Image (cartoon, helix red, strand yellow):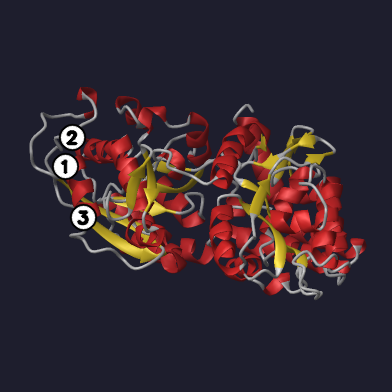
């Protein structure tokens, strides 16, 4: 079940401080003159000047922090007429840093929040810490084109308090060794039974032709990313569903239990990595890259990396993807929320409406194609070159280190919004699939809703179900034990979550 993780202790500890910050509206922000790069006349409240907007930003990074005088930052600043002061925080410690920053009251002008439905963020919003931006979006060419349905998903009490970072809705599929598939004499899977047969052949039929029983069909990790895809194919809801006018969690659906039995069958027959409950994402990737496993259910974009790595280590290897697997209810995939994190603007540092409009103008300009290509491809001649009128990476690793792992995190448009480059057939294939799969993406009806119990107890409730699911798959829990875990979840606050989601769903008139 995908849930908004509650951070009860942090929320309680910081609530008083946030209310105080909202009341005092004090901070470390600098007043700035309007930027010259305004997107429209209506977006500015005063005549533009040449004075750059001084903009402090806190966002995450996945590698080393870039230098403030880097060529990429200089180009961003020149194009947007902005002087940036960026606090780069490692992804691993980002949520904790956000909590500490909010509690301190010393806030940047733009703060990236990974989950705006966390209890402490909700408390801050309701205490008046952040600007509501919804009424201003229509005044900007790019911001006004952002998906209204995704804005619905980030709303708090019916209002928009930030700019979401857009993501594709349905990116998951099965990535598999197509050279192995050929070796075992099978075709790409079209049904759940086909999928089982592929995993079985990849385990038992010596797909790498080395004469050893040293391969496994499917690799997975402790968070069981692939399980949600299998459950969806089998007809289960995406986290929640509307049933008889009320919200009901996915694990109450019989199709969810069928997916559990499917995973248990894979485990019992050793067609899935036996130690998956203790593996992390990198170890899962290593299983594919080292030729130990033949398939993984994950973001299809990972396929390009697998293909490049395997080609170096195993000459003749090849990778393919499939995403539309026929199930009892047709072709289905779990749909995402359409975003990953939200940029929010504290009133303590953004003191006037005029300054807020300038900052919104910065993000609007950052969504112009020239900036999308800078953040997506880097600098021509250094990170990419042009071949056949299309960009192609010279050194993708360098681009990822200097741009993708840092500056790209400023972008609110989809990562795929950059100019289409010279791609491998695999990249073209899954790129087309991701767009087409939006039509079969199953929505989670609780995306725009807030349950107070979920935000405060979510981190306690989620493991009850997740642990029981894993134990059932490993044969350490029977069906009766699974039902007991559901009852435990209900009594621990789950029934209250159902009640609150259902009440808000009814109130919204959905």
In the picture, measured across the screen, residue 37 lies left or right of residue 183, that is left
* Residue 450, quarter of picture: top right
In the picture, measured across the screen, residue 506 lies left or right of residue 450, that is right
Q: Are marks 2 and 3 in contact (CB under 8 Å)?
A: no
Q: Residues within 10 Å of mark 2 (few under 14, many from 20)?
A: many
Residue 76: give x, y in percent of width and height.
23, 47
- Residue picked out by circle 3: 71
Q: Is mark 1 on a helix, strand or loop?
A: loop
> Does label 2 or label 3 sit earlier along the sequence?
2
Q: Do the residues labelled 1 and 2 touch (CB within 8 Å)?
A: yes
Measure the C-alpha gap from mark 2 to mark 3.
19 Å
Measure the C-alpha gap from mark 1 to mark 2.
6 Å
- Residue picked out by circle 2: 37
Residue at horizontal 91 percent and vertical 61 percent from the top: 479
Residue at horizontal 56 percent and vertical 44 percent from the top: 425
Residue at horizontal 20 percent and vertical 23 percent from the top: 41
Q: How crowded is mark 1: few (under 14 residues within 10 Å), some or many (20 or more)?
A: many
Q: How crowded is mark 3: few (under 14 residues within 10 Å), some or many (20 or more)?
A: few
Q: What element carries label 3?
A: helix
Foreground pick, 126 / 425? 425
Give the quadrant of the C terminus.
top right
């Amino acid at each position: 079940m995908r849930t908004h993780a509650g951070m009860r202790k942090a929320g309680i500890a910081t609530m008083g401080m946030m209310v105080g910050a909202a009341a005092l509206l004090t901070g470390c922000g600098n007043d700035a003159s309007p930027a010259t790069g305004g997107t429209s006349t209506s977006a500015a409240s005063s005549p533009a000047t040449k004075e750059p907007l001084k903009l402090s930003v806190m966002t995450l990074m996945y590698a080393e922090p870039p230098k403030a005088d880097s060529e990429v930052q200089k180009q961003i600043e020149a194009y947007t007429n902005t002087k940036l002061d960026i606090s780069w925080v490692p992804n691993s410690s980002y949520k904790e840093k956000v909590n500490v920053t909010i509690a301190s009251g010393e806030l940047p002008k733009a703060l990236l929040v990974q989950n705006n439905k966390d209890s402490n963020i909700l408390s801050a919003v309701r205490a008046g810490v952040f600007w509501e931006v919804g009424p201003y979006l229509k005044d900007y060419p790019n911001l006004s084109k952002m998906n209204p349905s995704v804005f619905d998903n980030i709303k708090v009490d019916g209002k928009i308090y930030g700019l979401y970072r857009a993501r594709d809705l349905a990116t998951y599929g099965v990535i598999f060794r197509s050279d192995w598939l050929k070796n075992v004499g099978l075709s790409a899977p079209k049904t759940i039974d086909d999928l089982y047969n592929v995993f079985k052949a990849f385990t038992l039929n010596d797909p790498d032709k080395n004469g050893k029983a040293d391969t496994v069909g499917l690799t997975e990790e402790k968070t069981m990313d692939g399980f949600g895809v299998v459950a969806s194919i089998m007809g289960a809801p995406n986290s929640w569903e509307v049933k008889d006018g009320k919200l009901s969690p996915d694990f109450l659906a019989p199709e969810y239990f069928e997916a559990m039995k499917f995973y248990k069958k894979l485990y019992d027959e050793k067609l899935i990595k036996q130690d998956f409950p203790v593996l992390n994402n990198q170890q899962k990737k290593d299983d594919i890259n080292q030729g130990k496993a033949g398939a993984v259910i994950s973001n299809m974009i990972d396929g390009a990396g697998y293909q490049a790595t395997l080609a170096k280590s195993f000459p003749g290897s090849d990778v393919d993807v499939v995403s539309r697997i026929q199930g009892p209810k047709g072709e289905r995939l779990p749909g995402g929320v359409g975003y990953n994190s939200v940029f929010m603007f504290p009133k303590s540092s953004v003191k006037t409406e005029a300054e807020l409009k300038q900052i919104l103008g910065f993000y609007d300009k950052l969504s112009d194609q020239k900036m999308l290509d800078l953040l997506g491809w880097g600098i021509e001649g250094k990170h990419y070159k042009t071949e056949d009128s299309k960009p192609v990476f010279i050194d993708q690793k360098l681009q990822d280190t200097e741009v993708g792992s840092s500056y790209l995190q400023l972008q609110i448009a989809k990562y795929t919004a950059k100019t289409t480059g010279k791609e491998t057939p695999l990249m073209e294939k899954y790129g087309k699939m991701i767009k087409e799969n939006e039509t079969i993406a199953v929505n989670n009806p609780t995306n725009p809703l807030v349950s107070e119990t979920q935000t405060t107890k979510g981190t306690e409730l989620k493991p009850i179900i997740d642990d029981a699911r894993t134990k059932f798959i490993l044969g350490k829990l029977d069906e009766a034990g699974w039902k007991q875990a559901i009852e435990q979840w209900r009594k621990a606050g789950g029934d209250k979550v159902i009640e609150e989601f259902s009440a808000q769903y009814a109130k919204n008139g959905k």
